[in-house]
Amino acid sequence: MQYVPTMGPVHFDYIENWDVNALAFESDNHDFVGVYVGAIVTIYSFFGSLLAYPRFLMSIGNPLAEEEWKSDIVDPKQLFRQPKDLARRSFAHLIATIAIDFLLAHEIGHLMNGHVKLLRTRKGMPLLAEFDPTQKTREENLTLQRLEMDADAFAVGQGLTTALGRAGDPTHVFPPDWRQWYGTSRQALFSWTLAIYGFFRLIFEGHGQSRRSR
Ligand SMILES: [Zn+2]
């Protein structure tokens, strides 16, 4: 198996920072993924408040159980609303988890496909952060954009394999309340696509700076 690149253990941890970011790095043949707590909270509250709105995704659960937003003024507490209807809450939980899984798989992709090693040995970059404000040359940006697309492709493969696998045997899906969203492959792809579309809209339009790949 000499053609398969070797890879050390991957260590994962949350980073106590309320910004939206994630990073990958390696040290002594150990690989590390760090996800900012802010990314997790932002993703969960985003999908929770979407499903807590009665006129969004009316085909999911019982939207009439949800309350209309009372005013046009954004109350910060409203941003952390979760759906009242159990099925809508289950769906919000599922798509938030799919989005977070995508982010994790994307970071693993950076490690498994050798991006982190390449940037460290060729460019002396100690870590690869998704949102990196340092100025880059045009050539560096092109290289980094390729790496982002490659990591996204890795995460898409992982996500679709999981989604279709769950639809193939919903009895193996946990928690059990998610099984209702995997009745058919079409349903599985709908949830996955919605989660990833929402994730990209959230991350790249709600964020002050654009990721290198945009
Ligand atoms: Zn990336």
Image (spheres, grey):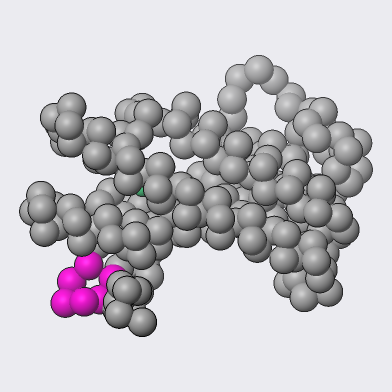
- Residue drawn at (81%, 49%), measured in percent from left and top? 187
Q: Choose between 118 and 200: the one closer to the eye.
A: 118
Q: Position of residue 14 (x, y in %)?
A: 38, 63
The image shows residue 27, relative to residue 153, as above or below, that is below
Q: Choose between 193 and 51: the one closer to the eye.
A: 193
Q: Quadrant of residue 66?
A: top right
Residue 9 visible to an observer of this rendering: yes
* Magenta region includes residue 29: yes
- Apparent side of residue 103 relative to residue 139 in the rendered image (left or right): right
- Apparent side of residue 41 relative to residue 113 in the rendered image (left or right): right
Q: Position of residue 116 (x, y in %)?
A: 24, 58
The image shows residue 132, relative to residue 155, as above or below, that is above
Q: What secondary structure characterizes most of the magenta part?
A: strand
Residue 37 visible to an observer of this rendering: no
- Residue drawn at (30%, 80%), measured in percent from left and top? 2
- Apparent side of residue 157 relative to residue 128 in the rendered image (left or right): right
Q: From the image, which quarter does the N terminus lie in?
A: bottom left
Number of dots carrying numbers: 0
Q: From the image, which quarter does the C terminus lie in?
A: top left
* Magenta region includes residue 118: no
- Residue drawn at (47%, 55%), measured in percent from left and top? 154
Span shown in magenta: 26-31
Q: Position of residue 144 (x, y in %)?
A: 27, 41
Q: Position of residue 108 (x, y in %)?
A: 40, 62
Q: Quadrant of residue 80?
A: top right
Q: Quadrant of residue 210?
A: top left
- Residue drawn at (32%, 46%), measured in percent from left and top? 147
